[in-house]
Amino acid sequence: MYTEYDKIKRIPITIKPDSRRIILRKFNLEQETILRIGRQLNGYSIEQIDAIHDHIMTKFSQRHRDFSGFLDSVYDELASVYPQTKAFNYKTRQVYCSYFVCEYSIEAAALFNPSMVLLPEKNDPDKTKFVLSLRAAGERHISSVEFMSGTLDHNGNIALDPVGGLAEMPVVVRHEPGLSKVEFHPATRLDERVIFPVAPEEINGIEDVRLVRFEQDNRITYYGTFTAYDGHHILSKIFKTSDFIKFDIHRLNGEAVNDKGMAIFPRKINGQYAMISRQDGDNLRIMFSGDILNWRESTVIKRPQTPWELVKTGNCGSPIETPQGWLLLTHGVGPMREYVLGACLLDLNRPDKIIAELPCPLLAPDADEREGYVPNVLYTCGGVIHNGRLILPYAMSDAVTGFATVNVDELINSMKPL
């Protein structure tokens, strides 16, 4: 019935989840359990406490950058429930805290739905640095945000930087309704930084970050729009960073942000921020605002029409500027809930107008990509253009991540004018 675009090429690179990637997180027990464990430890001998402390330090301290510091960070909350801990010596306090801390494998289930941005620095004139964001899913399929880095050479060849053995969450510097400020230690490598849910509305996951490199007044800011999920409701949010160390995480507000798939344009258009979205679950929409956090109205620019997208259509990342127009990657859901990727072109000055569209899917699941946590699904949260090529990271069946590439001029010339 339909086949994918014949000029797109898959790159033989696959990013697979690694269950050894772990973070420390605390978990909450009933108050009576907190009191009972405190009372029992209070009755242990110094020798018993020393033995437990030696055990946990030997077994866990080398797996984390600051294991003792994390245990210490849990203490104040426990002491408020069981004040007698103030009489504990340091080792007893650490042992006590260890009963309320666990390791969490952030990639135990999947590593998928990537987005990609280019960095401006040029350490090597023949290579361009990039950052990749990925959705990691662990126990109970709670999603967090991970980062990887790599380089593209002049021919579009991808070299991924090695991933280290450590992973850690940022420190929450400030938290209030609608805003969280988090910060990683500057000594951490990019691939060690994990944004794990911290706000109540995120407790069941931070999903599908769409990264964009936003340029204004000779300044570069990286935004990432994403979906927060609390297990019952979704909420659109956005983070802002200039260095991938300090992040301001805001809630998006307004009647026009009541669904998934928000993606910011990489610059203002006619003095306003612009964003692609899918508020009604079916149609592709665009909206404009003078305030990046508040969105009131949206306009439908594309409805499901072709056989591969009759269930629904949506965006796959921020539009990418080309001389011919804004290249917008899309996804469509067709028969048997198969997700395929598509592409269209928006007018540069009037991005609410689609001027051309690829008459076939850009990419569809092949025999090696259709098996996974959610079968028959290809998805991306954004690619980049580099030396005339679209570099497209994409997820296969909500499980692993791969890459594809296509010549941009050939792609646009293959589109059907509307």
Image (cartoon, rainbow, N blue to C red):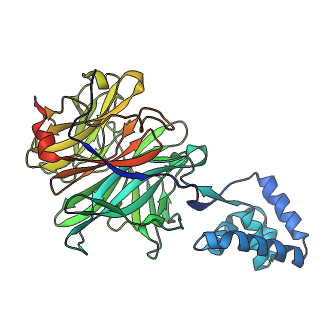
**Residue at image location 53% in from the left, 42% down from the top:** 230
Does residue 16 appear anywhere in the picture?
yes
The picture places residue 199, in percent across and down from the top left corner, at 52, 52
The picture places residue 388, in percent across and down from the top left corner, at 15, 53
The picture places residue 146, in percent across and down from the top left corner, at 45, 57
**Residue at image location 21% in from the left, 66% down from the top:** 219
Does residue 278 appear anywhere in the picture?
no
Splitting the image into 4 quarters, where does residue 297 fall?
Answer: top left
| Viewer-proximal residue among 43 and 157 | 157
| Viewer-proximal residue among 211 and 401 | 401
Asked if residue 33 lies left or right of residue 292, the reply is right
Asked if residue 254 lies left or right of residue 417, the reply is right
Asked if residue 336 lies left or right of residue 215, the reply is right
Q: Is residue 190 above or below residue 197?
A: below
| Viewer-proximal residue among 150 and 10 | 10
**Residue at image location 46% in from the left, 65% down from the top:** 163
**Residue at image location 47% in from the left, 36% down from the top:** 371
For the C terminus, the image quarter is top left
